[in-house]
Amino acid sequence: MSVGADLSSTLRARRDAGRKLLVPYITGGYPGWQDAIRACAANGADAVEIGIPFSDPIMDGPVIQQASQTALDGGATPQSILEEVPRLDVDIPLVVMTYYNVVHHEGSVRFAERLAAAGVTGCILPDLPLEESGEWCEAADAAGVATIMLAAPTAPDDRLPRITARARGFVYSVGLLGVTGERETLAETATTLAGRLKAITDTPVLVGVGVSNAEQAAMAVRVADGVIQGASMVRRLIESGPDEVGRYVAEVREAIDAVS
Amino acid sequence: MTITDGSPRSAMDQPDGTGRFGEFGGRFVPETLVPACQELEAGFADAWADTEWRAELDQVLRDYAGRPSAFTECHRLGGELGLRLLLKREDLNHTGSHKINNVIGQALLAKRMGKTRLVAETGAGQHGVATATAAALLGMECKVYMGAVDVERQALNVFRMRLLGAEVEAVHSGSRTLKDAVNEAMRDWVATVGDTHYCLGSVMGPHPYPFMVRQFHRVIGTEAREQARALLGDDPDVVVACVGGGSNAIGIFSGFVDTRSRLVGVEPAGGAAVTRGIPGVVHGMRSYLMQDEFGQVEEAHSISAGLDYPGVGPEHSYLSSIGRAEYPNVVDAEVIEAFQRLSRTEGIIPALEPAHAIAWVIREAPSMKGQTVLVNMSGRGDKDVGQMMDVLADRL
């Protein structure tokens, strides 16, 4: 059993070594989620984002909504998911993605400590923008959990440096105007925003939301340091199970390795 | 009378710089929406301070919506209950509820800010109908999200919205009611924020919505205060309104918060956020919220689609926390009884939402003998007649 590789140092070292970064998202509590994470780790993921499902996921489209609801209906709780994390026995960093009420309900300090105890070294809260994030960031910093900040295509130039200054681990560059889900093409905003962020920060910049297949991932990493893929992973988990997730991670890995 | 009187009221001031009323409110939205909320905050402040724009708003409220709304004393029901019962008649506004006040304000503001499309959530359909109406009036595109359960029980309003040119989308996620309609409207806004204004229907959501929507509904309280003083020579002893998100209640409370009047917001027993909730964060705000032991939002259950909501506007949480207003609740059976009783004694068929306020007055009347009790009649019951035909099938 290993307790979590550190997110910030791992990603930075790999990026500096010329590797493009791949972070799959898997909804915690969905049947087969543990094996899906192991499959990600075995097939070239650099970190995995574990979703703690919330009843009202406003940044998520239909696929992740459905996975979240199934997990909640099956009795998944933040506690039950985090108890499983140390047993995953993977050697890459693990990040939690959830909505702020899950944190608020338990209290920032207790939640951050619980993440750290489980070996989670990063956290993404998509409904906690910079202006509201002070208390959480302080608790997360103290617990050694990196708070990954989101940057969106709507941000004016004077807002981005404030976001990158507060980001730990990596900057989550939102690929398009919209919620999670697969699209036919990579939005132009994906590379535009990643370029704006790369110009102002040395923290790794990863594009997520709307990166839907290996080809789009390869396009994104021509500018960005890496990609986050959620809906395309979770759809495969729902339709075909963990093995198919692993096969797909290997496919994306190969495509982005060909770019660098 | 200036319709949208902006004069300050001591206990209902502006929220602080972070959009908080005490510890409630704030702006908990995806990063994509932060600039839009900031622009809206600035756009509203600019418009509200513009006397020409305010005059245009007042003119539309008067000539199109029918303001000021009437003030009616209910002699028969009041006599039976042993008190003086007064109604602020928001049910007589164009489109049949108080919702039009806010919607006209937001639609005029959206147009001023260069937006061409409105999205809205709706529960009972009253806010959706009002938004579709304003969109038609101002030549804007309109899409309304409505829980699939509510699409069923409020079929008449769905047809009205379509007749007015709006697109109505049934939401099948979660509890398939108002809460999920808000989620879906926010998801739409995240994707369309460039040309679209989210016309939120209550005093909830991220800052500046709770404050802005309250300002648009202040007109209810401002008129009612003058009307009460003209009729009674005094402020009412008790001011009562139903509370889902709480917009009609905030509107009428704003006229009396600095008086001696007792303020009562009546929630449905199945959606009693103030009584059963604890502070939580959903839909962009920190407020009392019904949730389970892990912070998952609970589903509300009410006969009234408009009050079927597990949260409450942050300013209500604040008014409760400082003890200025109280938030009791009533059960569906009391509401059904009040719906019939007001119809029979006064010839006014209330919407199921304000029937909650009437139900509380009926229940608590023995402790209010001889008092003056003002109820905000926030909407008319036409939309509920189909649903009540089923409920009362063997009783009438």
Image: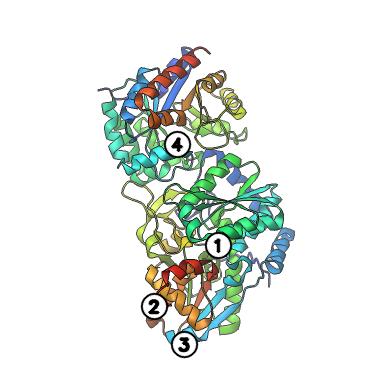
In the depicted structure, whether residue A211 falls above or below residue B11: above
Give residue A63's mark: 4
* Residue under numbered circle 2: B364
Query: In terms of secondary structure, where does tag 2 sit?
Result: helix
Query: In terms of secondary structure, where does tag 4 sit?
Result: helix
- The percent coordinates of residue A75 (x first, y second) are 30, 42
> What separation in Å lies between label 4 and label 3 (alpha carbons)?
58 Å
As rendered, which of A195 and A36 lies closer to the eye? A36
The quadrant holding residue B317 is bottom left
- The percent coordinates of residue B302 (x first, y second) are 41, 62
Q: Chain of mark 4?
A: A
For discs 4 and 3, the disc positioned in front in the rendered view: 4
Give residue B156's mark: 1
Say yes or no: labels 1 and 4 on the same chain: no
In the depicted structure, whether residue B184 falls above or below residue A80: below
Q: Is residue B233 visible?
A: no
Q: Chain of mark 1?
A: B
Amino acid type, mark 1: Leu
* Residue under numbered circle 3: B79
Tell me the quadrant of the picture where the N terminus of chain B can be found: bottom right
> What separation in Å lies between label 4 and label 2 (alpha carbons)?
49 Å
Question: Do the CB atoms of the residues marked 4 and 2 lie less than 8 Å apart?
Answer: no
Earlier in the chain: of badge 1 and badge 2, it is 1
Earlier in the chain: of badge 3 and badge 1, it is 3
The residue lying at 53 percent from left, 38 percent from top is B31
Query: In terms of secondary structure, where does tag 1 sit?
Result: helix
